[in-house]
Amino acid sequence: MKLITIAILVFTGGFSASGAFAQTRAEIATTCVTPPNADAAIAACSALIANGTETTANVVILYNQRGKAYHGKGQYDLAIADYTKAVELNPKYAIAFANRGVAYDEKGQYDLAIADYSSAIALNPNSAPFFANRGVAYDETGQYDLAIADESRAIALNPNFEGAFANRGGAYDEKGEYDLAIADESRAIELDPGDENAFTNRAKAYNHKGQYDLAIADENRAIGLDPNAQDALTNRCWTQAVLGRIQPALADCNQSLELKPGDAGTLDARGFVYLKMQNADAALADYNAALAANDRLAHSLYGRGLARHMKGDAVGGDADIAAAKAINAAIAAEFVKPGIKSH
C-alpha cells in the first residue's frame, strides 16, 4: 500500500513582463507558469530561459516551472536538474527544494528527499505540505514515529489537511496501531469523500484487525472511485482470498499487475492466493519474484517458507520462516487469521 504524496507546489507569485515584445513574452510566460499541458510548459519555459534577457528572479521561476513539467511527465532526472538550477540561483527558494524532494521521493531516493524537505522546512517552517511530504519519506524509510510527528505538525498547521490525516493513518497502520489508523483515515474521508487512497489505507487497517467485510467494503469504494486504483486492487485481491473468493481474488491481482507489472506487493498477494489454492509451484514463483524486488518482505519470506514445506523442502522452508520472523516476529499471525496453517 502506497501512502499519498502531496501535490507538487505551484508557483503563484508574480512574473514580471517587460521589453519591446512584452505582450508576446507575457503570453509565453503565462504558458510556462499556467500551461495547458506539460509539453507546452517545457517549450515556453525553455524559450524564455534561452532568451537570456530574464532577471535572475524570473529564471529561478522558469527552472522551477519547467522542472514541474518534466516531473509531470515522469522525467525525474530532468526535473531534478531544473530544480537544482533553481536552488543554485536562489538558495532560499523553498518551493524548489520541496519539489526536488518530491522528485527524489518518486525515484526512491528517500534520504535525499528528506534532506530537501528539511531544507524547505528550514526556509519556511509554516508550510503544512512540506511537513506532510517529509512525513511520507520518513514512512517509506520505516521511521514511523518521525512520520507521525511530521504529519501531526502538518495537521497542527492546517487542521483540515486531508492528505496529512491519510498519511498519518498509514504510519499508524505500519506501527500496528490500527484503531488510530482507522480514526485518521475516517477523518480523511470526512474531509474528502472522493479520495480513494484514504479508503484503501483504511481497508488495510481493517484487514490487520481481521475485519474483512469492512475492509472489502472500503476496497470496493476505492475501486468505484478509481477503477485503476492499483493499491486497492492488490488489497482486495488479498481480502477476497481470505474470504475464500479465489477466482475474483486472482482477477484483482492480475489486473493490478497489468497496471504495475512486477509490483512486489501484488506478487506477494497473488502468492498468498496460490497458497490458499494449495498451488505450491505458482506460489513459489510469485514469492521468488516479490523477493527479487525486495528481499526484506517478511510476508513473502514466510509464504515462500510455507510453499517450500508444501513441496517437502523442510530445510528451505524453515530457513525462510526464520528469516521472516527475524524481520517481523508476529508474521505467523498474518497467515493464521486467514486460515493458513503456520509453522
Image (tube, rainbow, N blue to C red):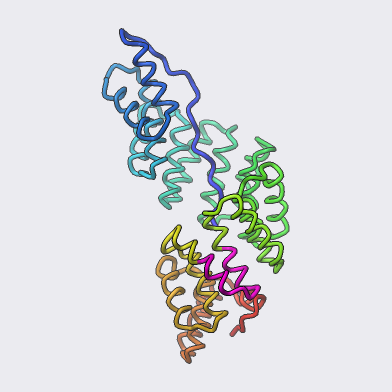
Residue 52 picture quarter: top left
Prevalent SS, magenta region: helix
Does the image show residue 202? yes
| Residue drawn at x 39%, y 13% as measured from the top left | 17
Asked if 16 appears above or below 314 in the picture, the reply is above
| Residue drawn at x 40%, y 25% as measured from the top left | 31
Residue 246 vs residue 67: left or right? Answer: right
Q: In which quadrant will I find the N terminus?
A: bottom right
Residue 54 picture quarter: top left
| Residue drawn at x 32%, y 29% as measured from the top left | 43
> 71 or 174: which is nearer to us?
71
> 322 or 239: which is nearer to us?
239
Q: Which residues are magenta?
A: 235-253
Q: Is residue 135 magenta?
A: no
Residue 72 at x, y = what percent? 42, 40
| Residue drawn at x 50%, y 64% as measured from the top left | 265
In the picture as drawn, the residue positioned furthest to the bottom comes out as: 312
Q: In which quadrant will I find the C terminus?
A: bottom right
> 17 or 146: which is nearer to us?
17
